Amino acid sequence: MIPDQRVAMNESVWLNNLKRKKSDIRAPEKFTVTQLLDWSWSRLVTLFVSDLLALAIAWQFARYLNQFYSPMPAQLIWWEWFGIPSPFWIFSGIIILLFAQAGLYTSSSQWKNYLQLGKLTSSVYFGSLVLSYFYDPKLDPPRSLFFTAWFSSIFLLIGFRLIATIILKQCATQQAPVPVFIIGDRAQIQRLSNTLEQRSHYQVVGSAETATFHETSLLREILKANPKEVLVADLPKTELASALYWQLRRFHIPMRLIPSSREILYRRGVPEIFAGVVTLRVEPPTMAAWEYRLKRWLDVISAFLGIIILSPLLIAIAIGIYVCSPGNPFFCQKRIGLHGKPFSMWKFRTMIPNAESLQKTLEAKNQTDGVLFKIQEDPRLIPIGKFLRRTSLDELPQLFNVLAGQMSLVGPRPLPIRDVERFESWHHTRHNVLPGITGLWQISGRSDLKDFNDVARLDLYYIDNWSFNLDLEILVETFRILFFAKGAY
């Protein structure tokens, strides 16, 4: 279907919607075959196959180990498909249904909730123990099979999802640009348009100033532009905002909201009715302390293993730097860490030895808003320096900072004293958590972000929405970006 025909069809459907007063606004439009060709369906199929394959391998692995012990009771095998007994298909069906119910196949970021995968899988296996006891207390399924299948299922599900995430994210960047419609005031529209133009996978197809539109005209303009998403920087009045959301939902067009500083306070709120008043209840997560300890274990174990495994590479890089530019191959700089306290951060040296003393002479060439210091073609770089920066190999010595407890694998990037001295008061919120080797800044544009306010907002989002699963997401995306060497200089 050509774009003009689709626009005409959308407008026709929109006019019909206005006439159908008796129709429930929550009712979706009729499903069409063309929706199966949408990218979201390709992702759903990929994730489904990934999960099913992980579960099948886990069960086959468990059966292989179990053959050396006791066989599975015949009472538990009702049929076999493809050489795999019925319990696998029952467990897999229940697990996948629970995943779907929990939104692990949706287009939102929930499909990257790796910890939820483990929790739901464990609940199925644990629940089966209880049911098997009431079904027949004398029936004792082989523990070697049961527990091997349980733990290998969790391990492989998360592992396959991590791999699928990298593949899907990279495939998404090869798709045609996503058409976006922007709603906001004139300044917001201009700023967001400039930002999206720097991202090859987004294309602004239309915009509207909030104050100049009412419900029907705004929806008509959106449908004419035929976007895949609507980005809202400034919400209209309540009545229009609610109606617009439901109308867009009927056309399967997702809405993205950019929160204000005040609205960010509500980000962890859970809707509740309190004394007849609609409120948002904000309370600490139940497992917050456990998740933080898990994060520190991951930091220490990963840093320790990383140093051991990568030691030949570390030595090779050090030798390469010394050959290109005689002198200490390491660079130590004071950075601001937890609670604003300075610490010595280590990197591989990518510039000439006296680079810091020359920075003042290059301030006029700074390509950011002034808080950060970035020059795309920095004359101080040594021959191997650009390669090390583009691949981020110069950051590897910070694994020692992680072991020392000064940094984490994931967190706001620690900045030099020169940059922190230019902070606004709200920017210092980032110092309430351990700084990291990588973070949302690194996976959301890295050197492409020129306005430090955008960097600070990413840091605030990370702090206020932190979870162990978010750290896993950032680490996976970091590996993907580093592999394709995008956005660093």
Image: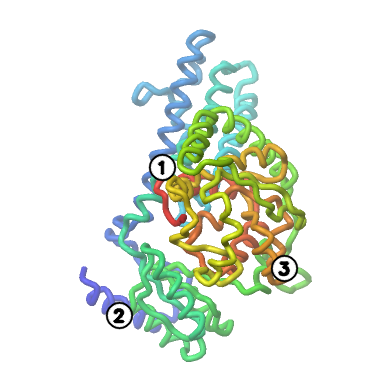
Q: Is residue 146 left or right of residue 96?
A: right
> From mark 2 to mark 3, how far is it between C-alphas?
39 Å
Write down the residue under mark 3. 273
Q: Secondary structure at mark 1?
A: helix
Q: Secondary structure at mark 2?
A: helix
Up/down of 253 relative to 414, above or below = below
Q: In this rendered view, identify the residue nearer to me: 54 or 205.
A: 205
Q: Secondary structure at mark 3?
A: strand
The quadrant where residue 429 appears: bottom right
Amino acid type, callout 2: Ser
Write down the residue under mark 1. 48
Q: Which mark is residue 7?
A: none
Spot occupied by residue 137 in the image (x, y as percentages of width and height): 65, 20
Up/down of 440 relative to 257, above or below = above
Q: Earlier in the sequence, mark 2 or mark 1?
A: 2
Amino acid type, callout 1: Phe
> From mark 1 to mark 3, how far is it between C-alphas?
37 Å
Given contact means CB atoms under 8 Å apart, are the residues at marks 2 and 3 in contact? no
Quadrant location, the N terminus:
bottom left
Amino acid type, callout 3: Ile
Q: In this rendered view, identify the residue nearer to me: 203 or 60.
A: 203
Write down the residue under mark 2. 12
Spot occupied by residue 48 in the image (x, y as percentages of width and height): 41, 42
Spot occupied by residue 476 in the image (x, y as percentages of width and height): 50, 45
